[in-house]
Image (spheres, rainbow, N blue to C red):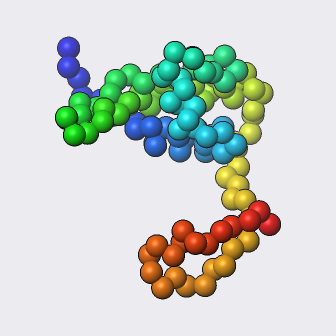
Amino acid sequence: MKATKHLLSVADVAFFLSRHLGPDLQWVDFLNDCRRKEARNIHGCRLLPVCRTAGTTSTARRPLYRPADVSQFIREVRDRAGIREPFPFVARAYVYDDRPASNDSEWVFRVAAPA
């Protein structure tokens, strides 16, 4: 039976995981690993997509996730890890040359080092 539901892309899920579980893990890589046979998990919790986009011969089929599954995964990981407080959004400090760019590709040549 076909149904219309709101679903999340890998990028959306990675954002929510980073926001609620911390930025220390590469969440897109984690989600990719979860879909493979290696069955990667965190604290015994694993997140799998519900379906994938239709795609065409020229576009890839992308995994999609139910918001309820993502919320449940976050709750379970936080409970098993003992995380009680919301994870604070923290930007790390870097030193780089912030002079205005003369063209759009100049960012490639700016190297940032941890402060």
Task: Name the spot of residue 75 as percent of width and height, x first.
Answer: 62, 27
Instruction: Count all numbered tags in the image, as a single digit.
Output: 0
106 left or right of 96 in image:
left
Single out the residue that lies furthest toward the front. 109
Residue nearer the viewer, 65 or 68: 65
Q: Indicate whether 82 appears above or below 114.
A: above
Residue nearer the viewer, 52 or 37: 37
Q: Image quadrant of residue 98?
A: bottom right
Q: Indicate whether 69 appears above or below 23.
A: above
Where, quadrant-wise, is the C terminus in this rendering?
bottom right
What residue lies at 75% left-to-right and 34% top-to-bottom?
A: 84
26 left or right of 69 in image:
right
What residue lies at 69% left-to-right and 29% top-to-bottom?
A: 78
Q: Image quadrant of residue 30?
A: top right
Residue nearer the viewer, 53 or 33: 33
Where, quadrant-wise, is the N terminus in this rendering?
top left
Q: Indicate whether 97 appears above or below 73.
A: below
Residue nearer the viewer, 68 or 49: 49
What residue lies at 66% left-to-right and 39% top-to-bottom?
A: 25
What residue lies at 38% left-to-right and 30% top-to-bottom?
A: 63
Task: Name the spot of residue 81 as percent of width and height, x first.
Answer: 75, 26
Residue 71 visible at all: no
Task: Name the spot of residue 53 as percent of width and height, x first.
Answer: 28, 32
Residue 83 visible at all: yes
Task: Name the spot of residue 54 as percent of width and height, x first.
Answer: 23, 30
